[in-house]
């Protein structure tokens, strides 16, 4: 097995890698680093999460070492990736003062970046738009550029940076080394290679599947209205230390964040409507574990590269197959393992087969965990945590006096252990019933239509399958208290429409339109029926919303 010490002879970098627990290079690192160290141009093609950052960062650092005039430039599609790459490079150089790094991207004040550029950095990491901006301002030039990197080149093309990349390439010296890394090789990338790269080597890491082998891919089938209840069960069953949840819309990000926070989870969200300051706050909270659940749209999550994400959840299946690969690639980075969970409903279960054909890999069909399953999984993790704590505290004598006192008072240790576990363990939860759909083919082997396709299966609070008679009782009970009523002070005289009311509540208190039932427009006021699960959204007042000059207000009737 190849080790990093077989590829490079640099104590500072080897010590930095060892500190991070990295000793063995990934295939893209093993093949790219020696070529780049020889001074060759390289196109590195490998799927997400295979360690491309180290593959170019190590040769970049070593190529500049001792070269007082040399400069390196790393171009990234997003500010998040720029910050992460900059952080990785800083880890590798440690306290070596020879290197000065500037991170340049949009959304941050010019003054701060001016100060960084005034220090004459020899490594610049940033997004193409802001890099060009600083070049045009005369704050940045690359007349001494010796090493150029394109990171996630395919993503930069998708985001419309094609013209910016060509402009940068025309402004750098012809004599420089280029490393271009990408998951896919688009025609424009081939044009860059033929026009601007010298006798390059194409390193392509083939994968049996488009997804990482170390990711355990699972799918759960349920009715759409049960998705939130399923999410709670799975979060409690797996207890990921860090989770990313993907949705297809900004409104669902907001809705899920409010729901999860109400349920006691440390969650926050990312979507395109967030201002940069809010985005930075959310990302910093996720990095430092102030929150451990990040809900995001695909656009907002571009370029995010955070270590130790144990689980990725596709709350909504992506509308493009490629997005599925990018989403689940957030976990199982750099040889680690991870879990990807996807939710499928009656409308979207066909997408599961499409994604599987694209990735050439089948998702495991999973049963919904029962309450007993969740308790068993939780107790197993609790046991392992206790064993780690015992090892960590084996020389801790600060509780010896208390232990002696307790030992004299209690001859039987079992009640004491029960009391201690009850103090440190979480509160017991109750879980709602989950309505399932069957993942069955449309036709049986004999060609006859399967009756099972038309039957709805239900899993009760204890996780067991429920028969038809019990289903009817559950539905009758659910329908009796399924909705509560909201009275709104506008009606026909105000020319208000049902959809207008839904949008007012959606935009102001972030409740999704699917939570609304029947809407009655009266002469002077209207009545909205809202699903009981949406009551928690109505703990806030509407902002200054008016319809035809009348300020809108509401009250809960039951």
Image (cartoon, helix red, strand yellow):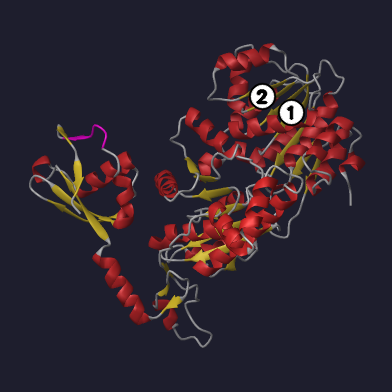
Spot occupied by residue 525 in the image (x, y as percentages of width and height): 12, 46
Vertical comparison of 532 with 68: above or below:
below
User: Tag 1 or tag 2, which sits nearer the N-term?
Assistant: 1
Position in image of residue 147 (x %, y %)? 78, 27
> Could you tell me which secondary element the residue under label 1 belongs to?
helix
Magenta stretch containing residue 545, yes or no?
A: yes
Q: In the image, what residue occupies the spot 75% across and 51% down? A: 391
SS at circle 2: helix
Residue 460 vs residue 156, the one in the foreground = 460
- 307 horizontally vs 501: left or right: right
Q: Toward the viewer: 411 or 383?
A: 411
Alpha carbons under labels 2 and 1: distance apart: 24 Å
Report the span colored magenta. 542-547
**Residue 211 visible, this orientation:** no
Q: Which residue is mark 1?
A: 90
Q: Is residue 552 above or below residue 132?
A: below
Q: Residue furthest front?
A: 408
- From this viewpoint, is residue 392 visible? yes
- Magenta stretch: dominant SS? loop
- 59 or 175, which lies in front? 59
Residue 135: image quadrant is top right
């Amino acid at each position: 097995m190849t080790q990093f010490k077989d590829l490079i002879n640099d104590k500072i970098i080897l010590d930095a890698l060892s500190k991070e627990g990295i000793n063995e290079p990934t295939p893209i690192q093993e093949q790219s680093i020696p070529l780049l160290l020889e001074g060759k141009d390289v196109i590195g093609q490998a799927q997400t999460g295979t360690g491309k950052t180290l593959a170019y960062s190590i040769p970049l650092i070593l190529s500049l070492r001792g070269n007082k005039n040399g400069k390196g430039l790393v171009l990234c599609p997003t500010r998040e990736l720029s910050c992460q790459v900059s952080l990785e490079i800083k880890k590798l150089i440690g306290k070596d003062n020879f290197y000065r790094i500037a991170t340049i991207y949009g959304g941050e004040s010019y003054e701060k970046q001016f100060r960084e550029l005034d220090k004459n950095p020899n490594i610049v990491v940033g997004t193409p738009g802001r890099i060009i901006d600083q070049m045009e301002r005369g704050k940045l030039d690359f007349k001494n550029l010796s090493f150029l990197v394109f990171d996630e080149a395919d993503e930069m093309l998708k985001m419309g940076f094609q013209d910016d990349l060509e402009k940068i390439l025309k402004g750098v010296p012809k004599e420089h080394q280029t490393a271009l890394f990408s998951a896919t090789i688009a025609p424009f990338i081939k044009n860059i290679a033929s026009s601007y790269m010298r006798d390059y080597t194409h390193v392509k890491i083939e994968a049996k599947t488009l997804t990482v082998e170390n990711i355990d891919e699972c799918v759960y089938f349920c009715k759409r209205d049960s998705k939130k209840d399923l999410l709670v069960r799975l979060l409690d069953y797996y207890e990921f230390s860090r989770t990313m949840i993907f949705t297809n819309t900004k409104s669902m990000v907001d809705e899920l964040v409010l729901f999860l926070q109400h349920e006691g989870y440390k969650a926050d969200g990312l979507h395109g409507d967030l201002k940069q300051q809010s985005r930075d706050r959310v990302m910093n909270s996720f990095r430092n574990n102030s929150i451990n659940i990040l809900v995001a749209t695909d656009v907002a999550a571009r370029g995010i590269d955070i270590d130790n994400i144990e689980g990725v959840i596709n709350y909504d299946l992506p509308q493009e197959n490629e997005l599925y690969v990018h989403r689940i690639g957030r976990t199982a980075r750099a040889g680690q393992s991870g879990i990807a969970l996807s939710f499928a409903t009656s409308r979207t279960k066909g997408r599961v087969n499409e994604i599987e054909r694209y990735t050439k890999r089948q998702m495991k069909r999973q049963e919904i965990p029962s309450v007993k399953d969740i308790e068993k999984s939780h107790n197993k993790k609790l046991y392992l945590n206790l064993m780690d704590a015992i090892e960590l505290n084996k020389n801790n004598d600060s509780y010896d006096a208390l232990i002696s006192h307790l030992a004299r008072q209690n001859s039987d240790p079992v009640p004491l252990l029960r009391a201690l576990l009850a103090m440190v363990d979480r509160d017991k939860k109750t879980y709602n019933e989950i309505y399932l759909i069957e993942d069955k083919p449309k036709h049986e082997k004999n060609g006859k239509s399967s009756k099972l396709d038309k039957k709805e299966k239900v899993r009760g609070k204890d996780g067991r399958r429920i028969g038809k008679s019990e289903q009817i009782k559950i539905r009758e009970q659910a329908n009796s208290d399924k909705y509560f009523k909201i009275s709104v002070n506008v009606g026909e005289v105000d020319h208000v429409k049902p959809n207008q009311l839904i949008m007012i509540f959606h935009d102001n208190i972030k409740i999704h339109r699917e939570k609304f039932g029947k809407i009655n427009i009266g002469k002077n006021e209207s009545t909205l029926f809202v699903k009981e699960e949406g009551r928690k959204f109505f703990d806030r007042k509407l902002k200054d919303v008016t319809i035809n000059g009348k300020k809108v207000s509401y009250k809960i009737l039951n």
